[in-house]
């Protein structure tokens, strides 16, 4: 009976027309294709790993539905649940956005609850690689639940994490495969209450792009899933792929366009580009990190099979598309994975035919035990084999 009432109320609150989405200008920026992945988690607050490659985008369209608000925590209550009184006060301020818009896909209901941005509006500021606090942030709250009302697994339960989600804000006019939570200083905190999973996003303040427009998207998996959405490079518009079978909620964040700052936006993108293109500067390494570096340094196309073994579940035979790009996607049960695009002309090292070439690697604080080595082998017909190797440990 309760579920029927929810459905009736949700239908009654549904908007009669789609929000208008106009683009002032299309910002283009070519990101660096190859980066290392690092995964670093701390209790309760989670930090998103950096992607190893650019993800590729595909094409589609979607709609928004209003949801019954009574059963969800308010944004301020979510902040209180994570013991952040400063953020709770920010969500009570006049600049905060409070929403209750829902979409259903892939057996889940995703609800956008609210967003707020500003300087020093949280008690828990993340820090950059230099240890400097990131004080100018955008906080956005999304609720995730089973569409049939089945409770989401508690964080303490063994089932928690079996189904992962990637939630991020995106900028209209910028490729979402390149610009998302993981590339814009992002992380998240989440908890489950009354069968609903709440996720609090924490990323760089994007209000400077308010005149362009922002989206909030949720897809299943640990990374941005390009097949879940449609990105039109000509217009910069992003929409849902209606034929996608998984989760692909996408909302428009209703920011005041007057809060946009083109000069600040241009400076921010320039800074991101400089960071992407800067030479790799290795931080001070512990013993595990030095062991990883030494291990990878001694690998060659001829001896990699002596020291590492391929994970067959990641092996893919890739052919170039009409633009000469190769696409791949993989994810392991432990949560590591990647999806993306390779362009051989942009590879740093030369790739010779029929040689297993390392294109990137990742590891956590566990060192060799967590090391994943990404390789490709180019064939004479133009196709290539992509496969991830792991060390053969004693």
Image (cartoon, rainbow, N blue to C red):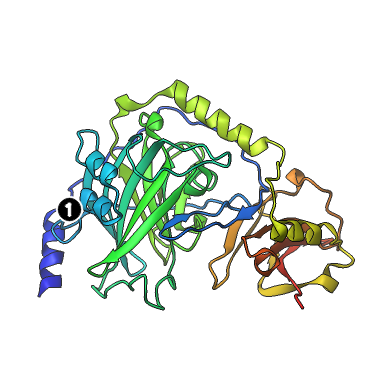
Identify the residue under disc 1.
14
Is the residue 295 above or below the residue 114 in the image? below
Q: Position of residue 357 (x, y in %)?
A: 81, 59
Q: In the displayed structure, does residue 294 sit left or right of residue 142?
A: right
Displayed quadrant of residue 280:
top right
Q: Nearer the viewer, residue 229 or 355?
A: 355
Image quarter where the N terminus lies is bottom left
Q: Residues within 10 Å of mark 1 (few under 14, many from 20)?
A: some
Q: In the displayed structure, does residue 285 sit left or right of residue 161?
A: right
Image quarter where the C terminus lies is bottom right
Q: Residue at x 40, y 59 (%)?
A: 44
Q: Residue at x 40, y 46 (%)?
A: 202
- Considering every residue shown, the one lying at the far top of the view is 263
Q: Residue at x 33, y 47 (%)?
A: 140
Q: Nearer the viewer, residue 319 or 375?
A: 375
Q: Secondary structure at mark 1?
A: loop
- Considering every residue shown, the one lying at the far right of the view is 302
Q: Position of residue 196 (x, y in %)?
A: 27, 66
Q: Residue at x 43, y 23 (%)?
A: 262
Q: Nearer the viewer, residue 228 or 322?
A: 228
Q: Position of residue 209 (x, y in %)?
A: 40, 31
């Amino acid at each position: 009976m309760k579920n029927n009432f929810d459905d009736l109320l949700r239908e009654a609150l549904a908007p009669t027309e789609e929000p208008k989405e106009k683009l002032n200008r299309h910002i283009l920026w070519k990101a660096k294709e190859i980066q290392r992945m690092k995964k670093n988690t701390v209790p309760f607050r989670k930090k998103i790993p950096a992607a190893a490659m650019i993800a590729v985008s595909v094409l589609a369209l979607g709609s928004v539905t209003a949801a019954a608000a009574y059963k969800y925590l308010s944004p301020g209550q979510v902040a209180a649940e994570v013991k952040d009184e400063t953020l709770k006060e920010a969500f009570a301020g006049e600049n905060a956005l409070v929403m209750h818009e829902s979409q259903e896909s892939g057996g889940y209901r995703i609800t956008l609850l609210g967003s707020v941005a500003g300087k020093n509006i949280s008690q828990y500021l993340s820090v950059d690689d230099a240890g400097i606090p990131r004080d100018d942030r955008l906080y956005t709250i999304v609720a995730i639940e089973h569409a049939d009302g089945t409770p989401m697994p508690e964080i303490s339960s063994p089932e928690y994490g079996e189904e992962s989600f990637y939630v991020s804000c995106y900028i209209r006019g910028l490729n979402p495969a390149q610009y998302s939570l993981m590339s814009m200083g992002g992380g998240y905190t989440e908890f489950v209450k009354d069968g609903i999973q709440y996720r609090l996003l924490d990323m760089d303040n994007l209000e400077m792009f308010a005149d362009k427009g922002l989206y909030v998207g949720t897809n299943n998996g640990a990374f941005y899933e390009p097949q879940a959405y449609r990105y039109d490079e000509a217009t910069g518009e992003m929409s849902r792929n209606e034929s996608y079978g998984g989760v692909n909620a996408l909302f428009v964040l209703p920011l005041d366009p007057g809060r946009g700052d083109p000069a600040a936006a241009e400076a921010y993108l320039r800074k991101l580009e400089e960071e992407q293109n800067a030479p790799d500067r290795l931080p001070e390494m512990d013993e595990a990190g030095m062991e990883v570096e030494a291990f990878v340094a001694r690998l060659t196309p001829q001896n990699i099979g002596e020291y590492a073994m391929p994970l067959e579940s990641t092996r893919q035979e890739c052919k170039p598309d009409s633009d000469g790009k190769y696409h791949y996607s993989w994810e392991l049960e432990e949560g590591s994975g990647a999806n993306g695009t390779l362009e051989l002309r942009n590879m740093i090292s030369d790739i010779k035919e029929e040689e297993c070439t390392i294109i990137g690697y990742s590891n956590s604080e566990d060192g060799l035990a967590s090391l994943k080595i990404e390789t490709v082998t180019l064939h004479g017909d133009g196709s290539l084999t992509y496969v991830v190797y792991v060390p053969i440990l004693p």
